[in-house]
Structures are given as structure tokens and as C-alpha cells.
Image (cartoon, grey):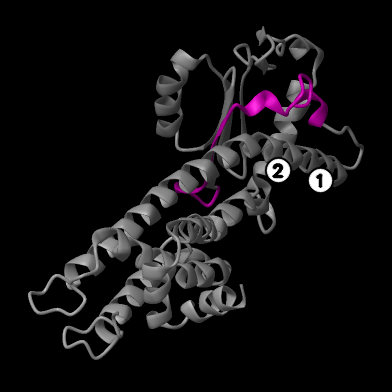
Amino acid sequence: MKKNIKLFFTSLISNNAAIDAGRKKPWYAAIILFFIGLVLSVVPTFSLEMAKHADKNFKTTTYSLREALTMFSEELAKDEHANDMYVIKQDKKTSTLANYETINYECQVNKAFFHFVGATKAEVPTKLEQLKALKGSYIVFTSDTVYFHIVDPNDINTTKLEYTCVDAYKKVGKDDFRNAFVKSDDLQEQQNKTWENWKGLIRKLYNQTRVRIAMNQLLVICIVNVGIYLIMGFMVWVLTRGKNNPYRMFNVWECYKICFWTGFSPALLTCGAGFLLRNFASTIFPLLLGVRVMWLSMKSLRPDGSGYAAN
């Protein structure tokens, strides 16, 4: 037991120990390290994506959205819009809680137009094209999706924020949009409180989309990292195929087991470095694994047999 633990920790930095472990230890040990390494390599990207919240982008400036949403909420709270939202589909699996087809409200703030539009799913492509042509910010409500497109009031050709919130109403109640408006004699207080309510709604709306994006990224990175493992294992096998290479006796499966043992330390480093180098979290593991395998090939699997002592 102690020898196995020592070999495991030694293999994190020693190529010879990784080769020994890959060749002599049970196949399931390599498979376990492969899966653990795969999980460690995707933890930073998945965690960073799940930590994103749409309302964080409004901490420094709101691009006049605060004022526009206050005006829209005030309009929405009027009695004539009391029946604009209703349950259009509800069963054991889904509960869609909004329909804004009767609302088409436009307001101008700081000389920039904000469009709040309701649409059916079929109308969305046409509506979005029309709204983009109007050169302003817009929010489009459909039966299950909310589209946010916010431009800079000082430069309407510059898009500052853009969200597509799918399955938007799973966590937002029937009257939450109407109830977001907070009436007050103090305009500043009215805007601030209404804006805080909307930030909470924006966070809830984006939650479903955030999970979907994170899962899609997780799937893509897992596929890429599995591919890197397979390529590096194959490379170890190819680099030992020389006619006079003393490591020619390594078969394909042994080369892959060596790669799985070798890949655990890059995965461990990725799990830590990915949180520090956020912009490169998804590329750190392929880079480190490639470097480790090249190092192993040049130092321990030299064609002259001066590296690893095969037996």
C-alpha cells in the first residue's frame, strides 16, 4: 500500500515512475486516474461559467437601462395591462407564465430609444431584424424566452450587453414583471428600488441560460480533453516505433496507460491555474499535457535507451 502511494506521488513529477506505473500497475488504476484527471481539467471552466450572473454587468453603469425599465415598469403596472400576462401552458413538465403580445412600448432616455416588445416565437426573427434596424436597445418577450440587447446611449452602434434567456419563466412568477415597479414620491428612490427588483429578475432569467451554456462548454471541453489524451497516447506509441528503439516492446495499451498516469499532474495543475488564468482555463490542460508527454519522450524514452531502464 505504502509503495503504491509513494509511486503515485512520485509519478506526478517523475517520468520514469509514470512509465513504471503505466506498465506494471493494474489497468483500472490508469482508467481511474484518467477519469479523475478529466474531471479536474474541466472544473475551472465549468465553475467560472456557473459563477457568472447577468446583473454583475450593471454594477458600474446601466447604459440608461435603469431609467428606461422604470418607465416601462410604470407603464406595465397600469390597470390596462393587468391581463397582459397569463398562463399559456402548464402541465407536469412545463409552466410558462408570460405573454406580452399586447405590449409594444417604446421610451426615449438620454436620446437613445428603448423598445420593449412582445412577440410570438414565429415573429421573433422578423422582430429582431426590425429592432436592430432601429438602432436602439430592446428587450423582446416571447412565451419562453427573453432577448436583451443593450447599446451605449452615447454610441448607439456599440452593443454593450446581449443576452438570450431561454426557458426564462421557470423561476420568474406570473406577476413579477408588473410588481417590479416601486411607486415613490422621490424619483431617485423610485428608480433605484425598481432597478434593484429588475436586477433580481435579470439574474433569475439568466440562470437557466447560464446552466445551459455551462453544460455545453463542459461537454465540448470534455470531448477536446479526451481527444488530447488519445492523441498523446498514440504519440507515445509512434515515438517508440523506431526499428532499433529499445522501447519498441511497449504495446498500444501500455502507451495509453502511461499517458493516463502522465496526464494526472497536468490535470491537477489545470485545476489550480485555471482559476488564476481565467481567460485560458480551457487551453491550459492540452498545453500542459503536451509539454509533459514531449518531456517524457525526450528524456525517458530516448532512442538510445539512456532514459527509462526497460525490463
Report the span colored magenta: 153-180
Q: Is residue 136 left or right of residue 129?
A: right
Q: Which residue is mark 2?
A: 66
Quadrant in which the C terminus appears = bottom left
Q: Which residue is mark 1?
A: 192
Q: Position of residue 1 (x, y in %)?
A: 61, 72
Q: Is residue 48 visible?
A: yes
Secondary structure of the residue carrying tag 1 is helix
**Of the residues shown, which amino acid type is indicated by label 2?**
Arg
Do the residues bearing badges 1 and 2 touch, measured as CB atoms within 8 Å?
yes
The one nearer the camera, 213 or 263, is: 263
Q: Mark 2: few, some, or many residues within 10 Å (few <14, many ≥20)?
A: many
In the rendered image, the residue lying farthest to the right is 185
Secondary structure of the residue carrying tag 2 is helix
Q: Is residue 213 above or below residue 105?
A: below
Does the stretch in magenta take in 166?
A: yes
Q: Mark 1: few, some, or many residues within 10 Å (few <14, many ≥20)?
A: some
Q: Residue at x 47, y 56 (%)?
A: 28
Q: Position of residue 177 (x, y in %)?
A: 75, 26
Image label count: 2
Q: Is residue 298 left or right of residue 183?
A: left
The one nearer the camera, 121 or 73, is: 121
Q: Earlier in the sequence, mark 1 or mark 2?
A: 2
In the rendered image, the residue lying farthest to the bottom is 306
**Of the residues shown, which amino acid type is indicated by label 1?**
Asn
The one nearer the camera, 234 or 116, is: 234
Q: Position of residue 169 (x, y in %)?
A: 67, 24
Q: Is residue 156 visible?
A: no
The one nearer the camera, 85 or 112, is: 85
Q: Residue at x 51, y 57 (%)?
A: 32
